[in-house]
Amino acid sequence: MTKDKDQPGIADLLMSKELLEHSKKLISNSNLIIKQLELQLHYCKSLVKSFSVRNNHHP
């Protein structure tokens, strides 16, 4: 009976480990996306600055 009780525990642990690994990958991917967005934002800001300098009407 103890063996039957242990099995789901091991399965749960393995499932938790898989979920944890999957979560780590998702977080890693999210961090990459955030980095890309930050680069795009930086690029947009520099574009806005260059337009502002060109147009001189908007300080």
Image (cartoon, rainbow, N blue to C red):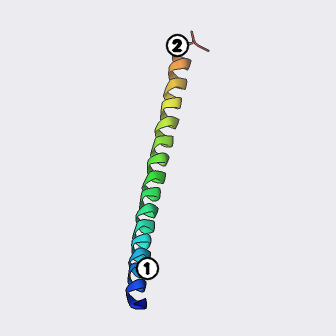
Q: Residue 23: x percent and y percent?
A: 44, 61
Q: Quadrant of the N terminus?
A: bottom left
Q: Is residue 3 above or below residue 24?
A: below
Q: Amino acid at mark 2?
A: Asn
At 39% from the left and 70% from the top, the residue drawn is 18
At 53% from the left and 30% from the top, the residue drawn is 45
Q: Residue 52: x percent and y percent?
A: 54, 18
Numbered disc in front, either 2 or 1: 1
Q: Is residue 39 above or below residue 6?
A: above
> Which is nearer the N-term, disc 2 or disc 1?
1
Q: Residue 9: x percent and y percent?
A: 43, 79
Q: Quadrant of residue 17?
A: bottom left
Q: Residues within 10 Å of mark 1 (few under 14, many from 20)?
A: few
Q: Quadrant of the C terminus?
A: top right
Q: Amino acid at mark 1?
A: Gly
The residue that disc 2 covers is: 55
At 50% from the left and 36% from the top, the residue drawn is 41
Residue 40 - label: none
Secondary element under disc 2, as helix, strand or loop, is: helix
The residue that disc 1 covers is: 9
